[in-house]
Amino acid sequence: MTTRWDLPAEQIMDLYRYRWMIETFFKWVKQHLKLVKIWSTKPQGMWNQMFLALAAYGLALILQLQLKSKKKLWPFLRLMRTYMYKPYSEFMEELYQGKSKKSRGRQKVPIPNEKETKFEGNVAIIKPQKKK
């Protein structure tokens, strides 16, 4: 709500729409650029921090696209941070390493066939049971 009675309704709606766009932008910045802590309270310091974070995000995205990695961006960034001070070859090995999990996980236990078999002479006759 607003206390500005001198503005027309359309202009107030535009102000709220622009404010919402700003809020969603900062939400995206917090989620993707890890800008949770602001290091400077001055406007220039905040702009610098935001531009540096955007540049780092863009460079990571470019590297991910050039390497044709199938990893999503967050695991890719985590891997970059882990191998930041290690040789590039180790980073590439880890990036293209296959899954280490050999198991297929918990599997369903097959239900045994509950058909009764009777032998009459040399021939087996299968008699189906009624389900309960």
Image (cartoon, rainbow, N blue to C red):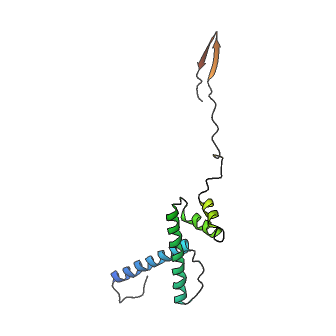
| Number of numbered markers | 0
Residue drawn at the location 51% of the way across and 80% of the way down = 51
Which x, y percent locates residue 105?
64, 47
Residue 88 located left or right of residue 17: right
In terms of depth relative to the viewer, which is nearer, 66 or 78?
66
Q: Quadrant of the C terminus?
A: top right
Q: Is residue 130 above or below residue 91?
A: above
In terms of depth relative to the viewer, which is nearer, 126 or 61?
61
Q: Quadrant of the N terminus?
A: bottom left
Which x, y percent locates residue 42?
55, 90
Residue 18 located left or right of residue 104: left
Residue 32 located left or right of residue 12: right
Residue drawn at the location 52% of the way across and 72% of the way down = 59
In terms of depth relative to the viewer, which is nearer, 87 or 84?
87
Residue drawn at the location 60% of the way across and 62% of the way down = 92
Residue drawn at the location 59% of the way across and 19% of the way down = 127
Q: Which residue is outermost to the top?
A: 121
Which x, y percent locates residue 30?
55, 75
Q: Is residue 117 above or below residue 120?
A: below
Which x, y percent locates residue 97?
61, 56
Q: Is residue 57 above or below residue 95?
A: below
